[in-house]
Each structure stands twice: as C-alpha cells, then as structure tokens.
Image (cartoon, grey):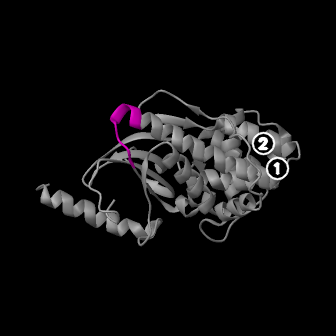
C-alpha cells in the first residue's frame, strides 16, 4: 500500500511462510481488509498442524504428512506415506506428534502448503534454505508447455467469517494423480492454477460483501512468478485493480516499511 501510495481500505492477500497470528497460530495464508492503521481478517487457508516448529521448515516431509493426515484422516493409505521416502521410525515419531498434538501449533501458512506439495511429489523432502521446496515446485510447473491448460483441482470455501479455504479435496486429487503416474510437472502446474483460482474466488466473495475493488498482493509466496501471473491475470479479468511490488521486496524485506507506515498512521491518529 505504501509503495503504491494507497491509504485503503483494500483487500490484502498476504501469502508467506511464517507470521505470528493474532490468535496465537502461525499465519501466512491470509485475506485482509486493511487501511494504514488496522485490518480485519476475512479469509485464510484452513489450519493444519505444524509438527515440530522450525524442524517442519527444514524437513518439508513433516508438513506433507500433516496435510496427508488432514486430507485422508487417521488412516492414511501406506502407498501415500511411501511417497514421502522417509524412514519408518521418523515417520512414526512425527505421526505420533500429529495425533497427540505434541510440539505442534496450527498454521495457515501458504509457504508450508508449498513445502507439503513439493515433498509429496518427491521434489524436496529436506531443504537447506528458506523457500527451496517452493522453488522446486515452481520450477517443475514452469517446465509444462503453455498449451497445457487443465481445470483446477477441486477446493472448498466454507461460509464462515473468516472464510476457510479448504484444500483437502485438492490434496486427495493431487495424490491420486501422482500415484496414477501422471507427470509431476503437470501436477505442479495444476496445483498453481488451483491456488490461483481459490484466491480469485475468495476476492470475489469479499468484493461482493464489502464493495472493494483494490487488491494488494504481498508476502514471500508472491515471489513465485507462476502463481503471481496466474493470480494477477485472473483478478484483472474480473475487473479488480491489482497492486504489486516493484521497488520494495515482497518478502520479509518489505516488513520494516509496513511497520513504519502503520506506526506513523497510529501516531497521526493519537494512538
């Protein structure tokens, strides 16, 4: 908003890896209505458990297991667990953490969702730098020719406030494609399209209820060019005014500017 000289209110889509949420959960897949001094949360990715904190960031297979358990329930088929390529002892340990909710915290992080999908597809079970799994997933998707134009995977939006973006059906369909032997690149591309479709549908719902047409996209996940282009093209096709970064980093590098802008506005208001 600061970079584009907006004061709001706007629809803000904030997709990132780790942010401390107002409810104590780890946020990172949020839709906000915001001005320079305040926000309300209107939608987010459905919570899943983050097993082991930072260990789940270094070992994306942990998030993959969390998403599989969320999508398939307590009895995940063995053939799906074998996709993670993890020793049985480690798998059982983290599975126990998830079942008993030991050393776990809920997360709506889009970054962790990308980690999970990358691990399920065998692109990154362990990483050495932030965003590595997401980069691998985007790279796979980028290998698909432009002529490949599938329908998005199914997903669900519930009617609560905030709206919950439920991707359990997405994960089930994605895993079915993978075990059926479909190319990982095509699955990765279809996943990107699905997430873009969910973003657009949520923004349409928010606009219908609040008559807002300005959308700001930020957060490290929007460094993903494949996702960003899909989202922007579809939002503009729906008549939204979409604002992006060009001078300020979309990831953590932009947070300091945002903090300063909010603090300045609160001081002006005498807060």
User: Which is more N-terminal, label 2 or label 1?
Assistant: 1
208 falls in the magenta region: yes
In the displayed structure, does residue 20 sit left or right of residue 71? left
Labels 1 and 2 touching (C-beta < 8 A): yes
Badge nearest the viewer, 1 or 2: 2
Spatial CA span between label 1 and label 2: 9 Å
Q: Which mark is residue 175?
A: 2
User: What is the quadrant of the C terminus in the image?
Assistant: bottom left
The residues colored magenta run 207-214
Residue 253 placement: quadrant: bottom left
Residue closest to the far top: 159
Q: Position of residue 234 (x, y in %)?
A: 55, 47
In the displayed structure, does residue 210 sit left or right of residue 163? left
Q: Secondary structure at mark 2?
A: helix
In the displayed structure, does residue 229 sit left or right of residue 265? right
Q: Position of residue 18 (x, y in %)?
A: 50, 57
- Pick the residue in front: 245 or 262: 245
Crowd tier of the residue under label 1, counting other residues whose Cα lies within 10 Å: few below 14, some 14–19, many 20 or above: some
Residue on which the image places disc 1: 83
Please give the count of numbered marks on the rendered protein: 2
> Can residue 161 be spotted in the picture?
yes
Residue closest to the far right: 181
């Amino acid at each position: 908003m600061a970079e584009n000289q907006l004061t709001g209110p706007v629809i803000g889509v904030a997709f990132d890896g780790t942010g401390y949420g107002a409810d104590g959960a780890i946020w990172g897949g949020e839709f906000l209505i915001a001005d320079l001094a305040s926000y309300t949360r209107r939608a987010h990715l459905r919570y899943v458990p983050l097993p082991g904190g930072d260990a789940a960031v270094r070992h994306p297979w942990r998030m993959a297991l969390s998403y599989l358990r969320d999508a398939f329930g307590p009895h995940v088929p063995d053939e799906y667990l074998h996709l993670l390529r993890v020793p049985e002892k480690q798998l059982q340990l983290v599975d126990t953490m998830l079942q008993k909710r030991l050393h776990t915290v809920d997360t709506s992080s889009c970054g962790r969702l990308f980690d999970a999908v990358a691990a399920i597809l065998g692109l990154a079970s362990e990483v050495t730098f932030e965003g590595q799994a997401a980069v691998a997933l985007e790279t796979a998707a980028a290998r698909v020719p432009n002529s490949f134009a599938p329908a998005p995977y199914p997903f669900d939006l519930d009617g609560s406030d905030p709206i919950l973006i439920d991707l359990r059906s997405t994960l089930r369909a994605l895993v079915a494609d993978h075990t059926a032997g479909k190319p990982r690149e095509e699955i990765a591309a279809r996943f990107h399209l699905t997430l873009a479709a969910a973003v657009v549908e949520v923004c349409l719902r928010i606009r219908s209820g609040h008559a807002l047409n300005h959308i700001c996209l930020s957060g490290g996940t929007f460094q993903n060019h494949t996702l960003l282009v899909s989202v922007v093209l579809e939002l503009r096709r729906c008549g939204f005014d979409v604002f992006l970064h060009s001078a300020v980093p979309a990831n953590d590098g932009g947070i300091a500017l945002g903090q300063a802008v909010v603090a300045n506005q609160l001081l002006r208001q005498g807060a």
